[in-house]
Image: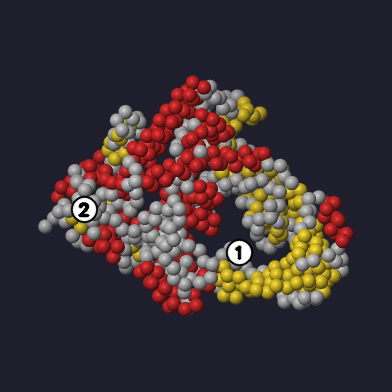
Amino acid sequence: MSRNLIIVESPTKAKTIRKMAGSHYKVVATVGHVRDLPKSKLGIDTENNYEPKYINIRGKGPIIKDLKKEAKKAGKVLLATDPDREGEAISWHLTHILDMDPNENVRISFNEITKDAVKKGIKNPRPIDMELVDAQQARRILDRLVGYKISPLLWKKVKSGLSAGRVQSVVLKIICDREEQIGEFEPSEYWTIMAKVLKNRRFLEAKYAGILEGDRIKSVELDSKEAADAVLKRLDKEYFTVHDVQKGSRKRRTLAPFTTSTMQQEANKRLNFSTRRTMQVAQRLYEGITIPGEGSVGLITYMRTDSTRISAQVVEKTKDYILSNYGKEYSNPSTWSKKKENTQDAHECIRPADVTRTPYELKDSLGRDEYRLYQLIWSRFVASQMTAAVYATQKVKLLSKKEVFQLNGNTLTFDGFLRVLPSKDQKDKEIPALEKGEKLKVKDILPEQHFTQPPARYNEASLIKLLEELGIGRPSTYAPIINTLLARYYVVMEEKRFVPTELGETVNGLLTEYFPMFVDEDFTAKMEHSLDAVAEGDIKWQDAVDPVYKQLMVYLEQAEKEIEKVEIRDEPTDVVCEKCGRNMVIKMGRYGKFLACPGFPECRNTKPLVEKIGVKCPKCDEGEIVVKRSKKGRKFYGCDRYPDCDFVSWDRPIDETCPKCGSILTERDTRKGKRIKCHNQECDYVKWEKSDDGEK
């Protein structure tokens, strides 16, 4: 009796499913897409209702041959590609290659790769969902039309190798617009006044709030030294009086389980993972990890989802787990089923396939990245089913004549969901009990000057959050978009934030002027609505494509006539090429600027661009500290006499010495402010400076 055949995309997924499906099934992998539009030409018949001309992907011949061979001898063929639009399209392409009827029950899907889910999927095959396929086709064809029509114009007018994309170009504009805001920003001066008062041999810090007028506090604008000095003159420098004490409690509610976007953001903030790295690790956790004694097991549900929904059965199972391990007071079951606008809600949230598989139990079976991401997913999911954390709060107003200072304290009285998902800002700020009318000795009053800061450049987490809020792209597309912008050198990463290059700003300027619709945030978001409407069967995919293509052609005709050749000149330097004698120029590469000989291709000499920071090397006292980059593009600091001197530091050295041991000090900007610490690892000297924008 011939065995049935199950086809998936990934060899790892095939390995995991193989033992779950049983001996009656053979499981093979396509290793991704098997058909696509040709790379060498447009591949879309714009005169014939945008008919795509798909071809078998080059290099996939042997795989396709094996698939046909296995399908011919199989009793039944089931297509088990990923449960999303892309997976549906791959299955549809397979029906063409294997001469299958897409209207028959040939498609199976499951949100998690567990034995029960796989068995249930096999028992419930269905036809190919052509509405999902059409939505994928519409996106693919739109991206192809925009990319293949605008990119050649950029090659002709700017330089070869450039690209424009339907979503990529909008994201580039967002980054360039932020850089323009930073450049145009004019800082404003402001002052703060902090008072240190003494209570039970303990110093408490209170912040100036304004003048007491009756029962309300009138704020005072401290926009100059004179304004701050005027307040200082009015203060009693000896004692402050406790004017009011408000005691209460507040609840800190738990967070929803992960969607693709929130997982990417949290992995970036907590684990320092790039979007691409997060998705690669999540893919491995979904497709299967080898567990001793069990074989390959899928540990999480499908990692491409915009829904926080949880099935009732999983909620019940998680409730039992929390009751058994933490107690009744920690349990707060929720399906998180409220559907947000722009949410497809095709799948559940990202969660553990089995909540009883704790990160600790799996630690020996997982690599470091897999363990850290699984721990984050597991903790976030379990926390979503737990009660709020409770804090006791104390808000105190101190009076100095008519001037009011405020200090707040909070103490965690019940940890709730923080039991499994500790927060970085969870640390209590306890203050002793204070009574109204009590006098507190003033130890010090500290006025401090600040200047408002420009808006911060986007990092991966903040950019993804903005894209999701604007409805631009889909979370599954964020990683390739970011990688394309970096690969084309339109942006570079500095201090983990996106900075547009001159090339990126040039391309953005041309696109903004001549293709305004394609860099418009609202238009791009509306296109996502159109694609969703195709997936719902509300409109035909050609109706989503046609108006976009017609407007594109109008823009192209005008741009071809009006855009002059743009010349991006390399910045010359005084550094002489030791191979040919020419003055080297500064070029922009994937990891930032570098020196190159202008005689390329005859002379291919390149060298790092040395960026001095004005600090002498503390180790050899001869060299200077310069900015360097690791193989992965991470910035660090080292001596310019390397390899004769091997001084290195991840933090930026400053021209100050440690008051405890005399070694050089280094600084780093963090969320709490600027951390200044001793470079000597045996010395524990650390001091903090608050950032001017008030971030903590």
- Left or right for 173, reference 660: left
Front-most of 656 and 179?
179
User: Is residue 265 in sight in this rendering?
Assistant: yes
Quadrant where the N terminus sits is bottom left
User: Is residue 357 in sight in this rendering?
Assistant: no
**Mark 1 or mark 2: whose residue is earlier in sequence:** 2
Residue occupying image coordinates x 41% and y 34%: 548
Q: Which tag is nearer the camera, tag 1 or tag 2?
A: 2
Residue occupying image coordinates x 15% and y 53%: 75
Per the model, the C-alpha gap separating discs 1 and 2 is 52 Å
Residue occupying image coordinates x 53% and y 72%: 416
Amino acid at pointer 2: Asn
Instruction: Say what secondary structure mark 1 lies in.
Output: loop
Q: Is residue 596 above or below residue 187?
A: above
Q: Which residue is mark 2?
A: 105
Figure coloring: secondary structure
Number of numbered discs: 2
Q: Which residue is mark 1?
A: 425
- Left or right for 694, reference 517: right
Q: x and y percent of residue 51 in the render?
A: 30, 34
- Left or right for 447, reference 492: right
